[in-house]
Amino acid sequence: MNLSLKKLLLTASLIFAAYLGYGQNVAYSTDPSGNIVAEDDRGFKKTYKKDAAGYIVVEDERGRYLMTLTKDIFGNDVEEYGNGRKRIYEKDIFGDTNIKDERGITIAAIKKNIFGDYIVTDDEGGRKVYKKDIFGNYTETDAEGKKRVYKKDVFGNTRVEDESGRTIGTYKKDIFGNTPFEAQ
């Protein structure tokens, strides 16, 4: 699997898992074929596997096609869904990522400011800022001023805390290298 595609998958998973983690625990594992399997506590599974062309195909627990992760002729990452919809992740000359739909309309943007902070904005006015401190912890601040802190411990686990310091959940690594999200 392409390293930039792995990073993109991991980043997207971490960003969205925190929001989904309130009501479910998500565990990531590898099946005997080497495919990545994401399973929540309600039994829903997504399997990420390579097809014959080398693209990553995402299927649900019944083997139904959900989407394909590919690259276009410009080297941009593309999510192609079964209903003809697409998401294209384009890098501009400043290194910022613009996420566009199949019509070329920007639906979100990921930018890095001069301080090294990541700013994620969407087309509905949502905005999140991710700052990294000297200890390697990330602080997420949304448009309403709510904060979440992602802290790593000595075992490689990542704790997610809200603005009051209460632990929301934890990404724990097990002995098999799987990373389930455990909501508190």
Image: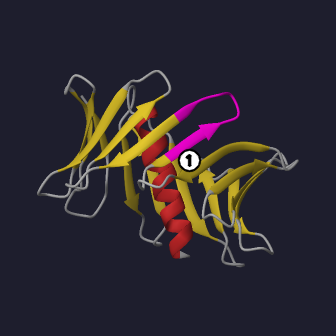
Is residue 1 visible in the rendered structure shown here? no
Please tell me which residue lies in front, 114 or 60.
Answer: 114
Query: Is 135 covered by the magenta stretch?
Result: no
Task: Give residue 14's position: percent from left, percent from top.
Answer: 42, 47
Image height of 15 relative to 98, above or below = above
- Judge left or right: residue 154 versus residue 112: left
Task: Give residue 113's position: percent from left, percent from top.
Answer: 50, 52
Image height of 14 relative to 163, above or below = below
Amino acid type of the residue tagged 1 in the rendering: Glu
Residue corresponding to mark 1: 61
Task: Give residue 168's position: percent from left, percent from top.
Answer: 27, 29
Dividing the picture into quadrants, the one containing residue 182 is: top left
Residue bounds of the magenta highlight = 119-127
Q: How is the image coloured?
A: secondary structure
Residue for point 56% across, 76% down: 2
Task: Give residue 87's position: percent from left, percent from top.
Answer: 73, 51
Categorize mark 1 by other alpha carbons within 10 Å: few (<14), some (14-19), many (20+): some
Query: Is 121 covered by the magenta stretch?
Result: yes
Residue for point 39% across, 54% down: 28
Residue for point 22% across, 46% down: 151
Please tell me which residue lies in front, 43 or 140.
Answer: 140
- Judge left or right: residue 97 versus residue 180: right
Circle 1 SS class: loop
Residue for point 68% across, 67% down: 93
